[in-house]
């Protein structure tokens, strides 16, 4: 045990520390220390083991990895010997007890485990659904807590849902709640959460009684020499501009190496992206209309910073045109802004601010190309934005703002990938996973930055969409849960902030999408209702915002459709009629808005399905015809648009279900081919559309096979389950 030794009037008085210290939380300095009079008395460590690892043997691989990671960890030299409330900081975290290794020859497992627990300063619980169901893991927690050391329990998640109540997904053993740890803070070793490196630092900081921020700073300082060497090599290799996203993340991402977080991620990025000309060479500027550039320079003036100021003014004007939907004029402003920034950097290539803004200019140009549907060209500009940001980080790897900028760049590339190429969703997943990790690194560098924390919620949201892209609904649900928890916490600190309300509304809405796909209708309805309620103040504050109006219209459609499954259909019909009036007003104000046309077509398809189910076949046919016209027009304007492709596929199936005949060959030619065999890396929605295509084309066996796959992924969306039952695809499920 830990014993507090007090010396008073030449008498030694011993007190168990657990009787004197208050309980706080994991990863904090858990022992309070004791002050008697004017003297402070610290804790003396008399334990045999630094930690006891408690785990279910299904998680042995994780336990073994954690055992090696802790015992091989070297505490930063400047922290060794520091006196904390837990004791003097050692150079190493050892020995660590792990029963599979240390109990191989034990004759009495129970007594040996109890002795090891009594002789361990800390207990580390490997948390997973298997561990939560393990009798022995729970018993080890209870016994350790009975020694009076609840505040020395540390949790690390390797699988499952931290907020889950379902026994099949919940990861925390029940014994934690029994001893008062109802919502234990925990490191999460999974790559989309804390990852291996940060998880280990969290455990070490808690066990040594060191603030996590201090340990992280020292850990980063310890690697400065590695950064410097890696930076030199990276600058030599990186003198080129990204032109396409071509390769998967390097295998090194899965290795717990000694490289710095930042430089490690930058080197990894090189394997993900194909590199070409160096932005610093400004090859594009050489091809620029030199007369036009001369006019821009002359108009900007000759004062210090004149070119940069003129460039920023042009960007502001371009943004105004962008918001008005005047993309051509916006592009002119953004390209002229790029030219002035490029000329500024050409004149002084030590002006890092100009180089940073040049990367921003690439982002704005890429965004307009994306609006215009020129996705390949858009990707070139967005990739250039990422490469410029990468070069800046090479120069200043400790700059948290630039590290977060890389997160933004990769999230844009990932979103572009999802929109441009539905056949390779794993690439989008790689990009958005990496985006999340850069966001986490920014928080390592600046842990108290609430903006970075809020952006981390968005990173989880983007990752959830990418996980849905490969039909990983459980992963998407966990990512959305993390986003929701982060946004709820930030909103609770400023509940009058409509911006925070809006982010929380988006989080609830995204959560509802995954819940609906997993057949959790009632919970999805609750999430959507919260989302709509939270968004109302933002709409009142921004009554002219087309984006908020469009969001509210689409969420209202979702709510009506979901409620139609549990309420009377005539009530849903009345609600849809009322919502149609709101849609007509919106489309009158924004008649050429592509996003509005797509979402209204989706609204019509839902209404047509309800009409068909109620026997109003004539009304259903009219709605389908109008929706088909809208979608085919969009596809002519935006060929390859993924959402429009999904809509035309759904519309064709509904027409076939209503009329029992396929549309014209010209319409059928617009359908994406969802019938390939690569379903293991496809969006669940796409696989469901593949099943519908198989039904239309008379290939019921394939439709049954696809349905079985979807159900194995827990895709039980009510609208699809109706198809499943109507065409006897899931009768054996």
Image: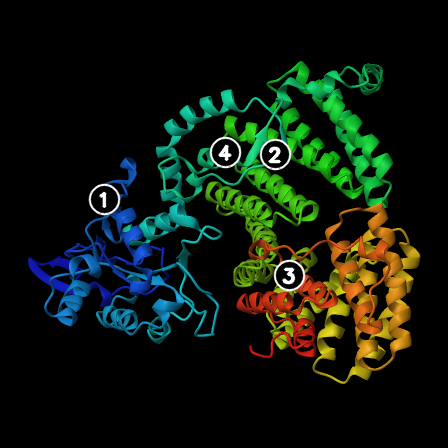
Cα distance in 3D space between marks 2 and 3? 32 Å
Q: Percent position (x, y) of residue 596?
A: 83, 56
Q: Percent position (x, y) of residue 379?
A: 68, 37
Quarter of the image where the C terminus is located: bottom right
Q: Label 3, on which residue?
A: 687
Q: Nearer the viewer, mark 3 or mark 4?
A: 3
Q: Nearer the viewer, mark 4 or mark 1?
A: 4
Cα distance in 3D space between marks 3 and 4? 35 Å
Give the quadrant of residue 610: bottom right
Cα distance in 3D space between marks 3 and 1? 51 Å
**722 in relation to 357, above or below:** below
Q: Earlier in the sequence, mark 4 or mark 2?
A: 4
Q: Earlier in the sequence, mark 2 or mark 3?
A: 2
Which mark identifies residue 92? 1
Callout 4: 10 Å neighbours few (<14), some, many (20+)? many
Q: Percent position (x, y) of residue 162?
A: 45, 65
Q: Earlier in the sequence, mark 3 or mark 4?
A: 4
Which mark identifies residue 266? 4
Q: Is residue 6 left or right of residue 390?
A: left
């Amino acid at each position: 045990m830990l014993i507090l030794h007090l010396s008073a009037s030449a008498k030694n008085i011993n007190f168990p520390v657990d009787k004197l210290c208050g309980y706080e939380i994991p990863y904090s300095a858990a022992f309070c220390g004791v002050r008697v009079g004017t003297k402070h008395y610290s804790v003396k460590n008399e334990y045999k083991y630094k930690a006891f690892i408690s785990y279910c043997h299904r998680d042995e691989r994780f336990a073994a990895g954690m055992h090696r990671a802790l015992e091989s960890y070297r505490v930063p030299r400047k922290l060794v010997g520091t006196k904390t409330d837990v004791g003097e900081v050692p150079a190493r975290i050892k020995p660590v007890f792990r029963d599979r290794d240390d109990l191989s020859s034990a004759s009495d497992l129970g007594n040996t485990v109890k002795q090891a627990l009594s002789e361990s300063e800390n207990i580390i619980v490997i948390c997973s659904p298997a561990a939560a169901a393990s009798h022995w893991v729970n018993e080890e927690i209870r016994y350790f807590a009975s020694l009076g050391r609840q505040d020395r329990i540390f949790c690390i998640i390797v699988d499952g849902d931290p907020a889950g109540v379902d026994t099949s997904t919940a990861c925390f053993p029940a014994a934690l709640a029994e001893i008062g740890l109802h919502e234990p803070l925990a490191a999460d070793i999974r790559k989309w959460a804390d990852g291996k490196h940060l998880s280990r630092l969290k455990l070490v900081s808690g066990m040594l009684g060191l603030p996590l921020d201090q340990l992280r700073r020292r850990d980063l300082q310890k690697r400065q020499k590695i950064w410097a060497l890696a930076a030199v090599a990276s600058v030599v290799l990186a003198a080129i501009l990204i032109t396409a996203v071509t390769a998967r993340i390097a295998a090194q991402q899965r290795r717990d190496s000694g490289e710095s977080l930042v430089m490690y991620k930058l080197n990894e990025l090189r394997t993900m992206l194909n590199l070409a000309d160096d932005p610093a060479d400004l090859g594009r500027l050489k091809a620029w209309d030199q007369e036009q550039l001369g006019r821009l320079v002359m108009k900007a003036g000759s004062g210090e910073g004149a070119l940069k100021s003129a460039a920023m003014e042009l960007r502001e004007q371009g943004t105004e045109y962008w918001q008005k939907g005047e993309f051509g004029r916006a592009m002119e402003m953004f390209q002229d802004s790029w030219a002035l920034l490029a000329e500024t950097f050409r004149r002084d290539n030590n002006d890092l601010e100009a180089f940073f803004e040049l990367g921003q200019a690439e982002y704005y140009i890429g965004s307009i190309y994306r609006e215009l549907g020129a996705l390949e060209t858009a990707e070139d500009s967005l990739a250039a934005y990422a490469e410029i940001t990468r070069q800046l980080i090479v120069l200043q790897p400790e700059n948290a703002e630039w590290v977060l900028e890389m997160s933004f760049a990769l999230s844009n590339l990932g979103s572009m990938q999802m929109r441009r190429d539905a056949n390779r969703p794993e690439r989008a997943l790689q990009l958005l996973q990496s985006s999340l990790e850069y966001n986490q690194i920014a928080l390592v560098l600046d842990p108290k930055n609430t903006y970075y924390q809020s952006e981390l919620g968005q990173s989880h949201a983007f990752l959830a969409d990418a996980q849905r892209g490969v039909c990983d609904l459980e992963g998407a649900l966990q990512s959305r849960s993390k986003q929701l928890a982060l946004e709820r916490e930030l909103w609770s600190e400023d509940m009058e902030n409509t911006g925070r309300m809006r982010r929380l509304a988006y989080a609830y809405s995204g959560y509802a999408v995954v819940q609906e796909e997993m057949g959790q209708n009632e919970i999805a309805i609750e999430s959507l209702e919260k989302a709509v309620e939270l968004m109302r103040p933002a709409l009142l504050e921004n009554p002219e915002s087309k984006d908020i109006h469009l969001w509210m219209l689409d969420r209202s459609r979702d709510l009506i459709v979901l409620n139609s499954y549990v309420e009377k259909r005539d009530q849903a019909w009345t609600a849809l009629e009322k919502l149609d009036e709101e849609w007509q007003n919106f489309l009158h104000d924004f008649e050429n808005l592509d996003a509005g046309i797509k979402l209204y077509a989706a609204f019509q398809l839902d209404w047509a399905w309800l009409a068909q189910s109620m026997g109003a076949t004539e009304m259903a046919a009219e709605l389908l015809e109008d929706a088909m016209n809208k979608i085919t027009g969009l596809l002519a304007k935006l060929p390859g648009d993924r959402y429009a492709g999904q809509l035309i596929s759904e519309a064709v199936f509904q027409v076939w279900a209503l009329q029992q005949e396929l549309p014209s060959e010209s319409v059928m030619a617009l359908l994406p081919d969802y019938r390939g065999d690569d379903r293991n890396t496809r969006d669940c929605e796409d696989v469901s559309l593949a099943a519908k295509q198989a039904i239309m084309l008379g290939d019921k066996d394939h439709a049954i096979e696809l349905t079985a796959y979807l159900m194995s992924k827990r895709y039980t969306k009510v609208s699809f389950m109706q198809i499943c039952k109507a065409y006897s695809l899931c009768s054996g499920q």
